[in-house]
């Protein structure tokens, strides 16, 4: 009988506290905004953090609370933006899809190295060691920080030691841009063709050519020959405006260092220069 009384007592106490918890949950419950779930469903679910929040759930809550813009999901592109804008009852301009591009052709064969590096396989660490092992202070070190930062597995290190971007996988989140300590990777419009000056050096003349066979020396020859004024000089480096470029190719012919090539040839394999790839 004592055991029975103990069981009944414990059961009664449990039922009493269960009732209290149920009443507390009912009276103190915070009404959830159904728009949070709707926004969350519209997101790609990559949890990449490109929006500035720790994940898609936090971003959805921030959008509903008015703390984040409806077009803040870069990987989702215009489709996701339109869906979220409809949920929130807002109008917003479509987001231009972007992809990452590598602005360096200085691979193991064409770029000089100052010493053999055996340290931590991390670009930021290598750069701290005497400014990096590449003779070009702005050249790609190829140790994979961008690869590890990419949540879409869109970047890999090619056989030439340089990063390669798979545009079919790239979500344009920009995390690889932030991960690169030398600014080698930049975002460019996904749907625009044109030519690129695939160099990141801000030196001029012989100092560039001594460090890399395919570096931009800042000679301005490409700028003078462009019929659409699509090329400008920014800190000794030629930069092409893809919106103005019409793929005429005059700059490619004029560049004696082969630093300019069509955007579709941005991935150059080891031992194959831009001039050979376009043949």
Image (tube, helix red, strand yellow):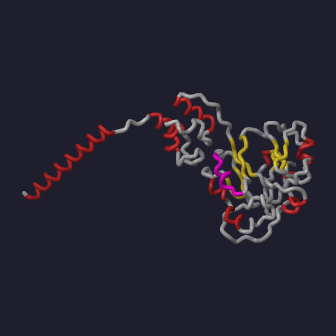
Q: Give residue 225's quadrant in the image.
A: top right
Q: Does residue 196 appear in the picture of this structure?
A: yes
Q: Is residue 279 left or right of residue 190?
A: right
User: Does residue 140 belong to the magenta stretch?
Assistant: no
Q: Does residue 169 appear in the picture of this structure?
A: no
Q: How many marks?
A: 0
Q: Is residue 223 left or right of residue 43?
A: right
Most foreground residue, 232 or 87: 232
For image coordinates 83% across by 50% down, the residue present is: 237
Q: Position of residue 219 (x, y in %)?
A: 91, 51
Q: Position of residue 141 (x, y in %)?
A: 73, 61
Which residue extends farthest left?
Answer: 1
Above or below — where is 59 with respect to 7?
A: above
For image coordinates 57% across by 37% down, the residue present is: 69
Most foreground residue, 26 or 158: 26
Q: Is residue 278 left or right of residue 6?
A: right
Q: Which residues are magenta?
A: 173-181
Q: Give residue 202's quadrant in the image.
A: bottom right
For image coordinates 73% across by 58% down, the residue present is: 158
Q: Is residue 42 left or right of residue 77?
A: left
Above or below — where is 161 with respect to 232?
A: below
Most foreground residue, 20 or 87: 20
Above or below — where is 4 with respect to 45?
A: below
For the N terminus, the quadrant is bottom left
User: Does residue 180 belong to the magenta stretch?
Assistant: yes
Q: Position of residue 266 (x, y in %)?
A: 78, 49
């Amino acid at each position: 009988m004592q055991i029975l009384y103990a069981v009944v007592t414990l059961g009664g106490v449990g039922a009493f506290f269960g009732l209290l918890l149920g009443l507390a949950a009912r009276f103190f419950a915070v009404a959830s905004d159904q728009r949070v779930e709707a926004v969350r469903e519209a997101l790609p679910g990559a949890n990449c953090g490109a929006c500035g929040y720790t994940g898609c759930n936090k971003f959805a809550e921030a959008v509903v609370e008015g703390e984040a813009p409806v077009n803040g999901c870069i990987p989702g592109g215009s489709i996701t933006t339109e869906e979220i804008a409809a949920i929130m009852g807002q109008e917003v301009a479509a987001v231009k899809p972007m992809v990452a591009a590598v602005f360096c052709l200085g691979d193991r064969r064409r770029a000089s190295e100052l010493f053999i590096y055996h340290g931590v396989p991390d670009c930021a660490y290598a750069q701290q060691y005497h400014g990096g092992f590449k003779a070009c202070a702005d050249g790609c070190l190829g140790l994979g920080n961008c690869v590890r930062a990419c949540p879409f597995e869109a970047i890999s290190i090619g056989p030439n030691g340089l990063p390669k971007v798979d545009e079919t996988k790239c979500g344009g989140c920009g995390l690889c841009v932030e991960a690169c300590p030398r600014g080698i990777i930049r975002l460019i419009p996904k749907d625009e063709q044109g030519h690129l000056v695939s160099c990141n050096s801000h030196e001029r003349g012989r100092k560039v050519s001594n460090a890399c066979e395919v570096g931009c020396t800042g000679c301005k020859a490409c700028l003078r020959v462009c019929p659409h004024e699509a090329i400008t000089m920014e800190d000794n480096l030629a930069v092409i405006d893809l919106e103005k470029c019409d793929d005429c190719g005059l700059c490619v012919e004029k560049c004696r260092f082969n630093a300019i090539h069509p955007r579709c040839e941005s991935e150059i394999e080891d031992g194959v220069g831009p001039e050979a790839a376009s043949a």
